[in-house]
Amino acid sequence: MNRIFKCNDKTIVGDRGAILCGIVNVTPDSFSDGGRWFSTDKAVARAMDLVAQGAGMLDIGGESTRPGSTPVEVQEEIGRITPVIRELKKRTDVPLSVDTWKAPVARAVIEAGADIVNDITGFLGDPDMAGVVGASKAGAVLMFNPVIARPDHPGSRIFPSFGGATAFSGEEIKKMEAMDIQDAMVFYLKRCIRIAREAGIEAERIMLDPGIGFGLTKKENLLLIRDLHVLNQMGCLSFVGVSRKRFVVNILEDAGFNLDPETEEGHKNRDEGSAALTAIATALGADVVRIHMIAGHKMHAKIGHAVRTAAKIEDVHLKQYEAKKR
């Protein structure tokens, strides 16, 4: 039986090749492109450019969640995002996702036409979030957030607060801290799914995100990517964000590559490293890959999908190897 994801009047079927989800940050301070699309006109133009390049989904954010970022007031976040959603609904049919963990923002963007709420806390940051999504026909991306799961971890302390202070008991947090990261992810996401289901959100309206880059060590990031199949075994489509993450930069810097974003070569290398991970993530089971640049990732996603579906591909001889007729 195919895994599917439904949001409003749209359906995504798993195992048909990864959908590339283009990122549009309507913020002045995002870690990668803060300020570049910080107006409705610029954000809409950027979004439509990504669709033209091949994006099958868009993820719009009005608050940076990078380490050291400044929290945004609810009304400011709504004011940044809703005009973009309304305008994009007139121009494209691709699913529109909004990156927010705040229930009032989710309510406003759903009313404006958003199809998906991409919650980096997995409904654990704001206790009203599940109810807001449950009362709609929108879908949800529920992310494993190690910052909430392990608040005292060294990697968690550099991030802003995402709420969720009472999501787990002290004993549960100790339990997750002692687990392998894959087991901690499953433990966390099972709680998120339970809350979603109690709010009336069907399993087919849920995607799961392993939380790459959020308070994780380099090894933990790589282990969660290697074991993406664990998410698909939970019965939902997987949503993975690896684009320009710090651990990718670190791997390439350690190998001697130029990753200085102020240089053309360094900027290009960041995206090529990210594209390599798109191929790997797609091969290992990612259904949606959230990325900054579409054009550079399309080829890699195709190769990754070919590897993933190798057993189903027709076993024919390559044309170049066919003997020439005499």
Image (spheres, grey):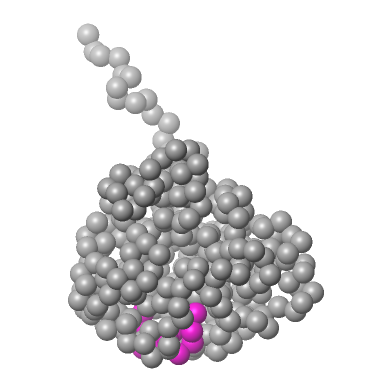
Q: Residue at x 34, y 75 (%)?
A: 27
Q: Nearer the viewer, residue 233 or 291?
A: 291
Q: Residue at x 46, y 56 (%)?
A: 245
**Range of the magenta residues?**
101-114
Across and down, in percent, residue 199 comes to 58, 85
Q: Judge left or right: residue 316 versus residue 145.
A: left
Q: Is residue 282 visible?
A: no
Q: Nearer the viewer, residue 141 or 150?
A: 150
Q: Nearer the viewer, residue 98 or 238?
A: 98
Q: Judge left or right: residue 41 versus residue 192.
A: left
Q: Is residue 18 above or below residue 144?
A: above
Q: Which of the image's four quarters has the C terminus?
A: top left
> Magenta span has 107?
yes
Across and down, in percent, residue 76 comes to 36, 87
Across and down, in percent, residue 140 comes to 48, 75
Across and down, in percent, residue 218 comes to 58, 51
Q: Judge left or right: residue 217 versus residue 78.
A: right
Write down the quadrant of residue 8 in the picture: bottom left
Q: Is residue 12 visible?
A: yes
Q: Residue at x 20, y 69 (%)?
A: 45
Q: Which residue reaches farthest top?
A: 326
